[in-house]
Structures are given as C-alpha cells and as structure tokens.
Amino acid sequence: MFDQAPPHMLTLWPKLESSLNVIAKRDGSGAIFFFSGDDQSLAACKAIANLTRWPTVTIPVTRDAERTFRETVREPLIKKDVQHGLFDERAAGMTVIVPNVDDRPEDFHSAMRFLFDHARRPYILLASGKDESRLPSYLGGHYYPCHKKGASLGSRHQDYGSV
C-alpha cells in the first residue's frame, strides 16, 4: 500500500508512524490530517502521497471543490464497480490530497464525512491545515491528527485513539 516514511518526517510529525500503521492494519483506508502554522503540512501530504502505490487526486481550493470532490473521489470510492477511470487492475485504491481542510466550507466537510462512512474501496485521504479547532466536530474520530513537532495544538485538540 505504501513505502516506509523517511525518518526526518517521523521526527517532524511524531504521530505519523502510528497513524500509517493503523491505516495499514485496516483495509488500507483512512485519513491523516497534518496541522502546522506553515506550508509543511501540505508538503507532508505530498510526501506521503508519493509513498503510496495508488493514483493521487488533489482537490483544488475552488468554489466548486465540493462538486469536484464528490465526482472525482467520493463517487468512485463508494461504488463497487470499476467503471470510473481511476480504478483498474493495477490500482486497488486512491490517494486524495485536500489542502487547507480547515478553510473548506461545511458542504465540503459533509462530503468528506459521507466518504468516511460509506467508502467501499480503499483510500488514503491526506489533508493539510493550520488549525484543527476550525473543523466541525462530526469529523472527529474519522481522521488521525498529526501536528508538526512544536506546533500549537489548537483549543479543541483531542487525541483520537492511540495514534
């Protein structure tokens, strides 16, 4: 599903290794949200996406991002058939990068939650953000938070599980 994360990333993101291990033990599906006050959270998403062996889709920050997410990510992952172009015999799953997850509107977060609850194909969703406390509470428990070493955790930070 993915190759070993480089040691410098494991140092910079203390919960990354345990998050990747939990995802690997499940059916390969899961979400990791990286939080930092700089651009390193997006760089971490891209670096982990490069370790996966699946096609990668990045959801741009646009007005119609929710529709893009729904059509290119959510719908193919909740359908069992292989009619969508992203899946073939070589690609068992999909890697999704969501920049600025904490700045996305409510409908986008709802579309993500629907994916978390109904995906029938494996996926790794990698999201970047600056402030975890800006996310709706209903997403809690659906992703593994990774805060950059030394970064502020935000006012509503919770540790979901042992990750």
Image: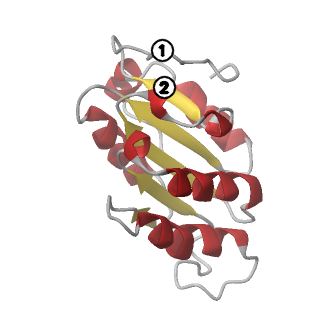
- Residues marked 2 and 1 touching at CB (< 8 Å): yes
Q: Amino acid at mark 1?
A: Ser
Question: Residue extending furthest bottom?
Answer: 83
Say left or right for 11 vs 70: left
For disc 1, the marked residue is 155
Q: Which mark is residue 93?
A: none
Out of 51 and 31, give the one closest to the viewer. 31
| Image quadrant occupied by the C terminus | top right
Q: Earlier in the sequence, mark 2 or mark 1?
A: 2
> Residue visible at 48% across and 65% down?
66
Other-residue count near label 1 (Cα within 10 Å), few / some / many at <14 / 14–19 / ≥20: few
Q: Amino acid at mark 2?
A: Ser
> Residue visible at 64% across and 33% down?
140
Residue 81 versus residue 104 in the image, above or below: below
Residue 93 is situated, as x and y percent measured from the top left of the image, at: 60, 64
Q: Quadrant of residue 137?
A: top right
Residue 96 is situated, as x and y percent measured from the top left of the image, at: 48, 58
> Residue visible at 57% across and 44% down?
31
> In this figure, which colouring scheme has been used for the structure?
secondary structure
Say left or right for 64 vs 91: left
Q: Secondary structure at mark 1?
A: loop
For disc 2, the marked residue is 133
